[in-house]
Amino acid sequence: MSLNGQNPRTVAHEKVDRPLAAYARDYEDGEETGWHDHVRAQLLYATEGVMRVGTSPMQFVVPPGRALWVPANTLHEVRTQGRVAMRALFFRADAAQVGELKPAVLGVSNLLRELILAACAEPLEWDEAGRGGHLAALILEEVARAPRLPFAIPALQDPRLRRLAEALAADPRSDLTLDDWAARCGASARTMARLFHAETGMGFARWRQTLRLAEAAALLAGGATPARAAAAVGYASAPAFGAAFRAAFGITPGEAR
């Protein structure tokens, strides 16, 4: 996929004279789009599978039940976990005012989900006075009303930190210390600590907790119980997990589920 919205699969969706255009594509496990951007804002949503979306400042875990708002001209990459059935929307500049100025995770209601699927069944140049126009109007209303969720992880740029991040995302239960990770990543613990503060504004322990809670949020959205999500990311106590989750996100694990 190339830069600046020139992907041949989506170029028509970014030029069509409609407030929004729906785009459907299925991905296999482990696919990567590479870094790219689009001239129109995009709502990334999948009915199946987990999308891991990177932007320059933040990383996002987007399971079914969540969507990611990506403003126009935002450089990003998408990696798939499991088979991903992507059903995305592109928004013309005037319609994109319902979204955010920065990438944001949105909660997807049952109504918005069905509206997105219905929009994917419409022709690219849908009838503005007919069913397509009614669907678009409702989608814009639902996107504007959708809850914004703080499920984001500060991105890491240094190659050594990225190796650490990838390993922890694969096994968030790991209790290796920063000294342990430093030895594995080829740097001193002091250097790793300095890099964490420089790139994220937080220490390793806080960053790891943020990653664990974001991974837990993805599990909860997929239907896992709070106890199972807590255990999967390394919390031995469900009450401790619940307190940390609420302190970080302002909602309980049950509400996130």
Image (cartoon, rainbow, N blue to C red):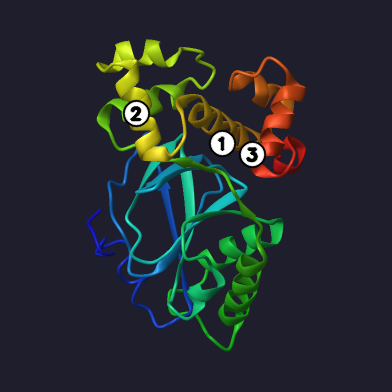
Please, is residue 234 above or below residue 166 in the view?
above
The residue lying toward the viewer, choosing from 140 and 21, is 140
Q: Amino acid at mark 1?
A: Ala
Question: Which residue position holds label 1?
Answer: 214
Q: Name the spot of residue 36 as percent of width and height, x first.
A: 28, 55
Q: Amino acid at mark 3?
A: Ala
Q: Secondary structure at mark 2?
A: helix
The residue lying toward the viewer, choosing from 233 and 244, is 244
Discs 2/1, front: 2
Please, is residue 66 above or below residue 38 in the view?
above
Tell me the residue at 33%/77% (across/down): 15
User: What is the crowding at mark 3: few (fewer than 14 residues within 10 Å), some, or many (at least 20)?
Assistant: some
Q: Amino acid at mark 2?
A: Arg
> Is any part of residue 225 visible from this angle?
no
The answer to whether marks 2 and 1 mark residues whose Cβ atoms lie closer than 8 Å is: no
* Sequence order check, earlier mark of 1 and 3: 1
Q: Name the spot of residue 6 as percent of width and height, x first.
A: 24, 64
Question: Which residue position holds label 3?
Answer: 248
* Sequence order check, earlier mark of 2 and 3: 2
Q: Quadrant of the C terminus?
A: top right
User: What is the crowding at mark 2: few (fewer than 14 residues within 10 Å), some, or many (at least 20)?
Assistant: some
Please, is residue 3 above or below residue 168 in the view?
below
Q: Name the spot of residue 107 as percent of width and height, x first.
A: 64, 53
Whole-angstrom CA distance, mark 2 to mark 1, is 23 Å
Discs 2/3, front: 2
The residue lying toward the viewer, choosing from 50 and 39, is 39
User: What is the crowding at mark 1: few (fewer than 14 residues within 10 Å), some, or many (at least 20)?
Assistant: many
Question: Which residue position holds label 2?
Answer: 194
The answer to whether marks 1 and 3 mark residues whose Cβ atoms lie closer than 8 Å is: no
